[in-house]
Image (cartoon, rainbow, N blue to C red):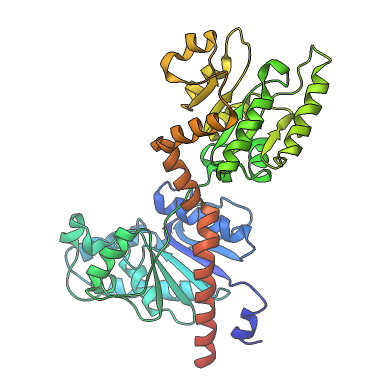
Amino acid sequence: MNDLTRHTHAKPRLAILHYAAPPTIGGVEATLAAHARLFARHGYPVKIIAGHGAPFDPHIPLEIIRDADSQSPRVLQINAELARGEVSPAFHALARELTRALTTALADCDLLIAHNALSLHKNLALTAALHALTGIHLIAWCHDFAWTDPQYAAALYPGSPWDLLRAPWANVTYVVVSRARQIELVKLWNAPGAITVIPPGIDPREFFNLAAPTAQWLAQFHLDDAAPLLILPARVTRRKQIERAIEIVAALRARGDAAQLVITGPLGAHNPANAAYWNELRELRRARGLEAFIIFLNEFGPVDDAVRRDLFLIADALLFPSAREGFGIPILEAALARLPIFCSDLAPFREIAREHAHYLAADASPAQIAQQIADTLTHDHAYQLKQRVLKNYSWEQIFVALIEPLVNKCFEIRARASLACPH
């Protein structure tokens, strides 16, 4: 089976290279780990090649090539010579050894993603080794540039190997992490080039260290697609006026907002009439066509303290339209989570929140309250930025929209090149 035929039947086999892998802490190492997990999750054979690190995922093999590290004793000695402008026989010997080691490590791979090795001078022998590689398509993932950073000016010299960092390589796909870096690289090359911008991302589940049930429900109900995600932390009892919250969400969605509401509590335990109220709420939810957008968590499992905390962290606002309350613990919780608060105009709520909550007039219609919520969030910079981050910088979104198409395009380029130049 030739490479082009295999391309139609299998996903590309990937290696990701950097000086270090986790548990080393750094932005590049975090990006490398996220990329590897995304590829593995989507069924791509992937491994990491690094100078040092430790296995961090049972589905992602790690191969250590000690002198791929920027801090190995041999590399540090050669770097000291390079910092004086000396390119010694030791440099060329290490470059050859690294070429052989990489060739062996990449024998079962189609594509190599190399982070920073084509743009930084931290291990120029590794850069030279990559330049000598054949038979694999190279993706240069550039976070930083030695030649444009003033702090590195004294360590760079005209000629080889430093010039490997300042000009594009033939048959290499270049990726940068921001539009600003793209402009910087074009200026460095002094020529236009095909440079793809793919930013790093974030996984809210990992960032918030969500409890397992929260993470499951976040995915199951697509809560990170909500805009806004409202939380109503209350038991199902009539005085909580959950029907009013449902009508508010219906009005928000009628406006075109992707609103969702999560009600955290079970049926109130001390009033048999709550069962009838629960049935009324479910019928109202069905009648408004909101089965996918009004989530009663008591239908799916208990909400413990960890899950309740998680829900406050991921929500966009507290919606608390109770008819009567003696106090208002959810107001305190929302305040600690820095959530906008939309609540009934009750004396206990005003005692707690004073002018720092948005009070719902008793005679306001659901449409009026929906407008109040929408107007408030439109001018809430934190909410607007959060929505931008979820839309444009979640790892899953970045992978599906940018990383996967690029990798598959590179795989096709590699397959066609192999057909044109058979071994």
Instruction: Measuring from the top left, give residue 179's x and y in whole percent.
Output: 33, 60
Quadrant assignment, res 237: top right
The one nearer the camera, 150 or 367, is 367
Q: Residue at coordinates 22% horizontally, 66% vertically from top-left?
A: 82
Q: Residue at coordinates 76% horizontally, 34% vertically from top-left?
A: 300
Q: Is residue 282 left or right of residue 309?
A: right
For residue 250, above or below residue 361 = below
Quadrant assignment, res 85: bottom left
The one nearer the camera, 79 or 415, is 415
The one nearer the camera, 63 or 27, is 27
For residue 276, above or below residue 32 = above
Instruction: Measuring from the top left, give residue 2's x and y in whole percent.
Output: 62, 87
Q: Is residue 24 left or right of residue 106?
A: left
Q: Residue at coordinates 42% horizontally, 61% vertically from top-left?
A: 198
Let me know if residue 423 appears in the view: no
Q: Residue at coordinates 38% horizontally, 79% vertically from top-left?
A: 132
Q: Quadrant of the N terminus?
A: bottom right
For residue 273, above or below residue 204 = above
Instruction: Measuring from the top left, give residue 110's x and y in whole percent.
Output: 54, 75
Instruction: Measuring from the top left, give residue 91's x and y in whole percent.
Output: 29, 71
Quadrant assignment, res 14: bottom right
Let me know if residue 293 appears in the view: yes
Report how many numbered discs are placed on residues in the image: 0
